[in-house]
Image (tube, rainbow, N blue to C red):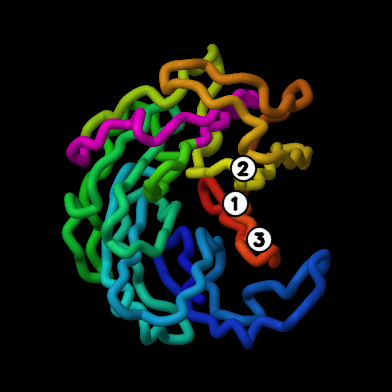
Amino acid sequence: LPLSVKKSKVYQLKAHEVPDSSRTAKGLPLVNLISLDPGEQVTSMLAVPDYNGEYLVMATQHGKIKRTQLSEYSQVRSNGLIAIGLEEGDVLGWVKISNGDEDILMTTVQGQTIRFKQSDVRPMGRPATGVNGVNLSDGDLVISMQLATPNDDLLVVTARGFGKRTRLDEYPTKGRAGGGVITIKLRPEDEVAGAVVVNDRSLLTFITVAGMVMRTSADEISQLSRATQGVTVIAPNSGDRVAALSVEEPEEDGGEPTTIISPNGL
């Protein structure tokens, strides 16, 4: 289980080292299992059966994108390994395992999404900073990095609770480092809180800053074109706002769903 943290390190933990517990249990603090440095926060957790023939794709809040052979992380020291070189003030936000074929989607706080081929990002060594994935406007930040899968949608939700699904084929594949296209028309004083790739079976959980939680199925959310405002998917109380969302993909055999946390390591 490679664990990536905001300060750009990766840790390794074998699944059997995590104590079994019930679904509703609080769990064990990670500092009891791995040697996290003070102030480090986990960005993502990935289950890796083996380290052959795949890549880790990483993105930062300042728009950097990087691809590294997964095999470079097969031997991780107890105090972690450098996963990516970060520029001053930047944060590692998203890490995905890829077979190298999927397009990359990067969505920003100000409502832009860029789609480009993964082959536009040459494989790099662990300490490398990466290359520009999206050209950000002043004050903008990346809020999501996703891998495009056939026949799926990009679900976008804003801090004020508006959202929609849009077919991935509405996002043109262009070269990396562009400004992208409009992914949602934002209302005044609103911003994108998260974006995830979903299908009709996906189960969603929206979480607000004040702790309000709402669960729904992706097929309950309207499918609309890119340059629209969306509809109300969650109504935060006055002064509250959407902080994060998670998507669960039900197992084909009816087992426990797989949970993917988004947008920014929450």
x then y, percent, for residue 60: 37, 50
Magenta-drawn stretch contains 164? yes
Mark 2 crowd level (few <14, some 14–19, many ≥20, 10 Å Cα): many
Say which residue label 3 marks: 257
- Residue 210, above or below 75: above
Asked if labels 3 and 2 touch by Cβ distance under 8 angstroms, the answer is: no
Q: Secondary structure at mark 1?
A: loop
x then y, percent, for residue 81: 38, 77
C-alpha gap between disc 2 and disc 3: 19 Å
x then y, percent, for residue 213: 76, 41
Determine which of the numbered discs, if any, sits on residue 244 in the image.
2
Looking at the image, which residue sits at the far front? 253
The disc, 3 or 1, on the residue closer to the chain's N-terminal end is 3
Identity, as a three-letter code, of the amino acid under mark 2: Ala
- Residue 54, above or below 260: below
What residue span does the magenta drawing correspond to? 155-177
Say which residue label 1 marks: 266
| Residue at image point 36% right, 52% down | 59
Identity, as a three-letter code, of the amino acid under mark 1: Leu
The disc, 2 or 1, on the residue closer to the chain's N-terminal end is 2
Residue 87 visible in the displayed image: no
Mark 1 crowd level (few <14, some 14–19, many ≥20, 10 Å Cα): some
Identity, as a three-letter code, of the amino acid under mark 3: Pro
C-alpha gap between disc 2 and disc 1: 6 Å
The disc, 2 or 3, on the residue closer to the chain's N-terminal end is 2
| Residue at image point 66% right, 82% down | 18
Q: Secondary structure at mark 2?
A: strand
> Horizontal placement of 72 versus 39: left or right?
left
| Residue at image point 36% right, 32% down | 113
